[in-house]
Amino acid sequence: MPRLPFTRPTGPSADHSVHPMELFFDLVFVFAVTQLSHYLLEHHNLAGVLQTLVMFLAVWWAWIYTAWATNWLDPERAPVRLKLAFVMLLGLVLSSAIPQAFGRYGLYFALAYVAIQVSRTFYTAWARGEWQAGSWNMTRAGFYFLAAAPLWIAGGLDADPTRRLLWWSAALAVEYAGPATFFAVPGLGRSTAEDWAISGEHMAERCALFIILSLGEGILVTGATFARLEADGATVAAFVSAFAASVAMWWIYFDTGARRGSDRIEHDSRPGLLGRAAYTYCHIPIVAGIIVLAVADEQVLVHPAGHGGPFLLAALLGGALLFIGGTAAFKRMTGVSGRWPLSHLVGIGMFALLGAWAVAVHPAPLHLHMAATGLFVAIAVWEWGSYHGGWVERWARWRAGRARPTAG
């Protein structure tokens, strides 16, 4: 069968690694993550939280659908690269509009988002070549974005922030229902799991790299904030605590979960279904948790010894619960046994207790943050010791290495 025009090579020897153009593309969405963190920091009330959530879900949906598209399309082809560059430009407009998305730039945000989703989805359907199952799958997906487009534009035209939030929430409900319903469209039928045949290796790597970029954005915010502050003892301690928490979060996600997830989806008989559940949907709370925790880190750096207040407590504990809960669900979906990781369940319980303690005692922000960092480190160490043979085998290997005679 001849290879389709702009699709990646297939077969056992095909290269499914992430292309440099895809990494270049992600830079725009790192900017979007930064914009979302700053928006939440400046709008720390219920309305601000809901607005940030709606914008985050839009940003994630734009990125993850592009990840699916480049799983099939070959970035080595010039037309695919040009399309990704065009989506990057639209993404830059989308990201730049975030600070005023519920103000004077709402229509720009909506138009940029609709243009990304509609143009990229129908382009992918066309670029896959002959009208076969994969092309019809993307065509059906495109109709969901077309159905939601009037809601996005109506929200952008509505000057009232509350009504805009409702318009855009309705639009997201339509779009997020698409994969769950297999893109059922009257007259066009619905997709099947076979239509979602993907490279599991590529999907796992794409999402893992986005986690790294999101964690990196948090580190950049921490470093930039620390650079403009007076480096006293409390500020330095807050800086170290924020960095240690980021390292522990990386460890929790990547030490066993990311590798095991990649292996599982690569060898799964229906990788598209696992890609939908474990990567498309399940990574939402993981990335959201990273964004919210970056807000808490910046607050603690600026006011390490003051009174934290309810927003800091909500950001720190809410972000932690989102990240740990999302990672636990991801590991359950991609694990061999299908069980929830005990370390994460206990960690969720400990964070709940930490919240109760904070409400009762009202600790300084630095002390609360350091306690949360200690829990992240404890979960990471527990997870690290529970796999690869556990603590007993790790201890035996360490002793064997110490006993091995040195050369010379």
Image: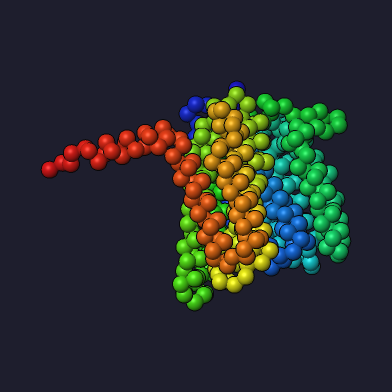
Tally the marks: 0
Location of residue 113 in the rendering, given as x and y in whole percent from the top left corner: 74, 53
**In the image: residue 39, left or right of residue 249:** right
- Residue at horizontal 37 percent and vertical 33 percent from the top: 393
- Which of the 4 quarters of the picture holds residue 160? bottom right
Location of residue 62 in the rendering, given as x and y in whole percent from the top left corner: 69, 48
Position of the C terminus, as image quadrant, is top left
- Residue at horizontal 73 percent and vertical 36 percent from the top: 179
**In the image: residue 53, left or right of residue 400:** right
Q: Height in image: 190 above or below 369?
A: above
Tell me if residue 368 can be seen.
yes
Position of the N terminus, as image quadrant, is top right
Tell me if residue 89 can be seen.
no
Give the residue furthest to the bottom: 230
Q: Height in image: 221 above or below 135?
A: below
Location of residue 372 in the rendering, given as x and y in whole percent from the top left corner: 55, 56
- Which of the 4 quarters of the picture holds residue 355? bottom right
Q: Nearer the viewer, residue 350 or 10?
A: 350
Give the residue furthest to the front: 360
- Residue at horizontal 55 percent and vertical 38 percent from the top: 342
- Which of the 4 quarters of the picture holds residue 346? top right
